[in-house]
Image (cartoon, helix red, strand yellow):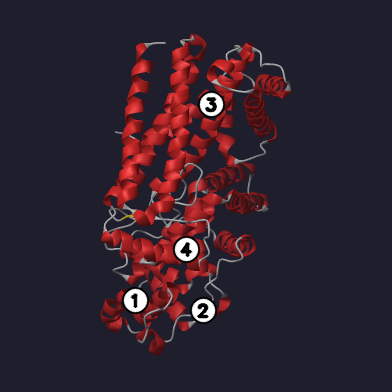
Amino acid sequence: MSLLGFMSVKLDKQQILLERLNEALLMVQSESLGRAADLGFNAEQIRAAKETLRDFISRLREKLDKDKGGEELSVVVTRILEGQFELNEWLEELAKLETQLAQPAPLPTASIPTLEAVLAILDEELTAAFNQLYSH
Amino acid sequence: MPYYRIAKTAELDLLFNWLEEQLRQLRAANPEHAVLLNYLDQEYKRADIKLTLLETLLALNDPNFEKRADKLSHDLSRYIIPTANHYVAGLQCQGPRGRQVRKVLLHLCQRLRLDWIEDILTCLHRDMAVLAEYRGLFAIPVFFGPPYLLETILEVPGIYHEFGHSVFARDEVFRQHLSTIVKTHFAQLKQQHAPISPDQKALRDKEIDGAAASWGALWLAEIFCDLFASYVCGPAYLASIVDLGRARGFPPYTLASNSHPPNGARVMTSYFALSDQQRQHPTVQKMYAAWQNFTSTFTPGQDYRIRCSEELLKSLALEVNALIAQLLPNVPRYTKTPTDLVAARHVQAGIPLEDLINAGVSILFEAPDEFANWQQSARLLIA
């Protein structure tokens, strides 16, 4: 198979994951800012969105801590380990986030940047791979 | 919100209108692709809801949501590109030849019990490849192939390799198992005691780590597909991969590309995947001899010997055979030995494609002077 086939599968998996997380973050953030109703999100959707993010953060923490879990998180883990923050700082931050996302209360707005930082890594990697396959 | 976001969203809106119209026209022009178009419509509707959400978000004019709006916009752009480039363009240019190939491929998937595949779009303008997954769906792959596909028997086994990608991509367990075999193999290799100094050991460990690293997701996918093809079409795939390795004359122990293991490893793995009875068959022995004859003028380097040791290749072949049998018990293994010459000369309409290509390689290796004439008539039996 040419690289097209392999890359397209890889891209599709990353894209589906990122779309799910982007949408979940929008719902969670809209609740934190008191604008969920303006965007038409109900309580059940927000609860499910928190669970989506919590599950992702939990898997990421597991992968960072014990190198367990699927291939989809390897890229994020590599980038985190190469970054300027210590592994322990990340693990603490992610554990805190996981706890907050398990609560029925809105996620504190101060926690949004951590989620954004993780999703930004996925986004950058996906965009780079996407451009490689579909560049002008 | 800056004007760029509003303008970009308006552009997306235009593209969505174009896409909706294309899908409508394609449905009218391609009634046989109703299933595929149903999936495309379903994904279009989902994306369209997201576009409405983006428009609502922009209307809030809240700077706190700027990043979220950008991400939604990126997601929508990344939905449109593969949908338009592969599916819309593919449906627009699929001619009668493509439709004929599509039928052959759908029959093939039916025989192999790749039940998750509901429709196939064929694009005959490039080398073989399969887009196995679209928006998390494995039901509507796009199959790419050269315009002369099905004209030569030796080209056909490559199709089975391509559908292996659908199997591999659909279930993460295949990659996990193969990855474990590779990791275990190289870890054991490191532990083997040898009378060498600590410095030599460190150097050797580095070589082993490098070899292990080359078995990334790409190589694992490709070797799985070789093994899948060997599983479902038996000796014919070995003949095809020997041909692939010899035809271009590329050194067998050198990397031909970053995406595939060296041809030497691919041929040997396909050989190990055959049953004992198939391997011992005289025609298969001739295929193997043809490969050995080609490779005899090359010497594998130390890097190849570490990366692609016979022990590792055998383990991969045995494990994949067992995994397919366990996880996909309905997928039929091709257990027949090569067709005898008399039967191969008299293949008739209605013969399964796997039997036909195995008859073809019997003619090729046992009566090569008959091959051209045989192929002229046999290719008409491909159905």
The amino acid sitting under disc 4 is Cys
Q: Which residue is mark 2?
A: B336
Q: Is disc 4 on the same chain as disc 3?
A: no
SS for tag 3? helix
Q: Which mark is residue B381?
A: 1
Q: Which residue is mark 4?
A: B109
Q: Position of residue B301 (x, y in %)?
A: 45, 56
- For badge 3, the amino acid type reads Asn
- In-image side of B325 versus B359 (left or right): right
Give the chain letter at badge 4.
Answer: B
Q: Residues within 10 Å of mark 4 (few under 14, many from 20)?
A: many
Mark closer to the observer (2, 4): 4
Crowding at mark 3 (Cα within 10 Å: few <14, some 14-19, many 20+): many
Check residue A22 in the rendering and tell me which mark sits there, or answer none: 3
Residue at the image position 29 percent from the left and 56 percent from the top: B124
Residue B68 in the figure: left or right of residue B242:
right
Q: CA distance from mark 3 to mark 4?
A: 36 Å
Residues marked 3 and 4 touching at CB (< 8 Å): no
Q: Secondary structure at mark 1?
A: helix
The lab-note entry on whether marks 4 and 1 share a chain reads yes
Quarter holding the C terminus of chain B? bottom left
Q: Mark 1 against mark 2, which lies toward the viewer?
A: 1
SS state under label 4 = helix
Residue lying at the far bottom in this picture: please name it.
Answer: B342
Mark 4 and mark 1 lie on one chain; the one further toward the N terminus is: 4
